[in-house]
Amino acid sequence: MSVVADPDLGEEPREPAGVVPVVVLDDVWRVFPTDPPVEALRAVHLRVDPGEYVAIIGPSGSGKSTLLNVLGLLDRPTGGTYQLDGIDTAALGDRARAAERGRRIGFVFQSFHLLSYRSVEENVMLSELYLGTSRRDRRCRAVEALERVGLGHRLGFSPIRLSGGERQRVAIARALLGEPSLLLCDEPTGNLDSANTAAVLDLFDDLRAQGLTILVITHDTEVAARAQRRVRMVDGQLAEVA
């Protein structure tokens, strides 16, 4: 994120006017009430600005999945605050949280979650099935999203005819359909070989260059190395990686 200052006046750098972070976690805790209690997240602080590409790395059991659920508005923190696009998510009821999740977050998972009996185009269209938009509008938007990820030539194909990398790109197109503020990815290359992994990571580079905010949760250091910024999770706490 760029900052501005006037050194002649001895000013400290300050953020550009009007910049609203996409994600702000402030002293976030998630404690599960077992016996004894499990502190899955401990005093987590994280800020992600528009257009940033951030990788969160860490071993299994470090709290990455819990953090994903909090970031994706699938779970509520026990303490602290989470602001998404400047919205205090703690103040939202369940229905409002679901609406904001659908409007502002695109999810990409390790598994592609594509329907084999639907075409590529129809799989992408399904993400807006319950929004009340016309089938024609959904189709146009799906075609645009598929072209954006380089799959405009695969519209009528069944997912079973695609490579693993192409299936993941279909899933990414589906996540992009609503023009989300945040693309939240959980081990997005976990089921891919090295060639398809490189293709998906190249796509993330392109999307980030277009201004999309991307947050990838991964245990793969090679995947994390492609991100603009890296943070490490250990025992429920985050720390920046130099």
Image: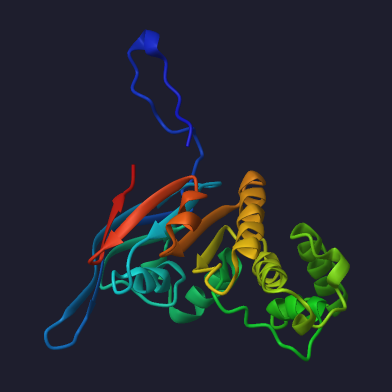
Color theme of the render: rainbow
In the image, what residue occupies the spot 71% across and 71% down?
Answer: 170
Q: Position of residue 18 (x, y in %)?
A: 51, 39
What x and y, as percent, mark residue 232?
33, 56
Left or right for 137, reference 205? right
Of 6 and 222, nearer the camera is 222
Residue pictured at 49% horizontal, 34% vertical: 17
User: Residue 133, how many percent across, how many down?
Assistant: 78, 76
Left or right: residue 151 compared with residue 164: right
Quarter of the image where the C terminus is located = top left
Q: Between residues 181 and 115, which one lies in front from this camera angle? A: 115
Q: Residue at x 88, y 78 (%)?
A: 156
* Residue 5 shows up from this direction: yes
Residue 177 position (above or below residue 222): below
What residue occupies the far top of the structure in this picture? 8
Image quadrant assignment for residue 80? bottom left
Q: Is residue 206 placed above or below 190 in the rendered structure?
A: above
- Note whether 160 is above or below 188 in the view shown: below
